[in-house]
Every structure is written in C-alpha cells, then in structure tokens.
Image: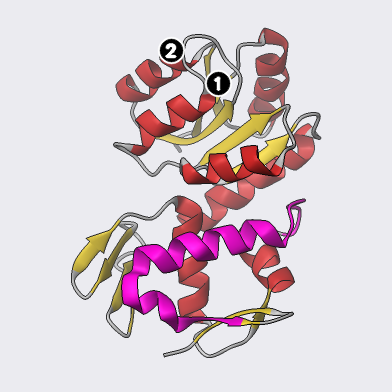
Amino acid sequence: MDVTKILVVDDESRMRKLLRDFLVKNNYNVIEAADGEEAVEIFMNTKDISLIILDVMMPKLDGYGVAEEIRKISKVPIIMLTAKSDEKDELKGFEYGIDEYITKPFSPKILVARVEAILRRSNSTEENEIIEVAGIEMDLVAHIVKVDGNPIELSYKEFELLNYFLINKGVALSREKILNNVWNYDYFGDARTIDTHVKKLRSKLGNKGDYIKTIWGMGYKFEV
C-alpha cells in the first residue's frame, strides 16, 4: 500500500521536525523544504504529493508566492501555518487558494486531525461519481466543475462547499453546520471564513451564484 506523501515547508528546522515526527507517527511520508523556492521545485519534481503544509514567512519565496505558483498547475490541498492572526492575512490566504489556515502556536494533534479530515474527504468519493444540478456539473473524482458546460476553477475548499450545497439542495444550512461538515468539527475559525468562501463561490458560478441564498441570522440555502 502506498504511503501518502505530505510536503512540509518551513524555514525553521525545529518546526519541520515537530511536524514530521507527528505525521510519520501517523504513517505519512513526509518530504521537507526549508524555503519557498525549494518547495516549488520539490513539488514540480515529485509525483503524488497529496497535501502541503506551508509556512507564510520564509526566505526567497514566501508562502503566498508558493501557493500562487502551485495553484497554476495543481489543486492539491494546502494548509497554511502563520504566526499572524490578523483577519486580513487569513483572507489573503484564501485568495491564494489556501484550504486551511492555522495560527501558531497550535496543537500538532489537531493539525494531524485536520490533515486526516482533508484527505478523508478528498478520497471518499466513488469512481465516476457526478452531481448535476441546474446546469452545474461536479465530477467528484476528477475534481472538475462545469457551469453550462464551461469549466470553472475552484479551490479545494470552494469545491467542498459547492458539493455540500448541492447534496443539500433546498435545505437551510446554519453556519455552524457548514463549518462542522466542510471544515470539520475541530476547525477553530468563525463565520467570516464561510462568508468569504461563499462570496468567492457565487462570483465564480456567475448568474448561478444566485442559487446560493443567504438566510439572515442563520446561514445559507442552495435553492433553484
């Protein structure tokens, strides 16, 4: 059985060792990079990397730059680590296609739980499973979304959010319920994270973004 590969990118060797020890203990194959340029080079030359854990502040190329380069060719899930806790920094990360955003210091056990949750969700779909609602088509295996036959680019988390909306068509969903099911129960973020992703998802869906209705004081509902 192949061991899942995770790329850990951090300029602090102590942090890389901490992450490696916990991930290896949970049967992951860890590849390390000490700066942004090395991370991009490793990713381009290594097959089957399933997830990236990425620090923000690094020499040569920061985490946002790494994410930007990788998103040009891949939708691999990215967890970003940062010492910053400002909302603007978190929103900036989502703009670059970051899937999870964790502020240091953090519990390594919680980080591993998030890794497992992301990989479990990305690997849980059945082959050839396709969802189609009102001209929105989702290929869950190929990770492709088409609107009226035209492909659109979604981040991993936007894809998960749209999937959750479609399979719960017509159901009123609270922000708490969305967090628990799309971001997993151990996510420490708040409603602004959901609202940011919904705003971007609506924009990418074009006029079909209007199907995502806001329920004031509660959450959202996908209604055709």
Q: Secondary structure at mark 2?
A: helix
| Quadrant in which residue 50 is drawn | top left
Query: Mark 1 near mark 2, Cβ–Cβ under 8 Å?
Result: yes
Residue 99: give x, y in percent of width and height.
54, 46
The question of residue 125 being in magenta is answered with no
- Secondary element at tag 1: strand
Residue 209 sits inside the magenta stretch: yes
Task: Tell me the quarter of the image containing the C terminus.
Answer: bottom left
Residue 125 in view in this figure: no
Give the magenta range: 185-214
The correct choice, above or below, for 61 with respect to 115 in the image is above
Q: Looking at the picture, which amino acid does disc 2 mark?
A: Glu
Q: In the image, residue 58 lies at what x, y percent?
A: 57, 15
- In depth, the one of 183 and 92 nearer the eye is 92
Q: Which of the numbered marks, if any, corresponds to residue 38?
A: 2
Indicate the position of residue 70 as horizontal and vertical percent values. Answer: 37, 32
Q: Which residue is mark 1?
A: 9
Which residue is found at the position 71% from the left and 62% from the top?
191
Tell me the amino acid under the disc marked 1. Answer: Val
Magenta region's main secondary structure? helix
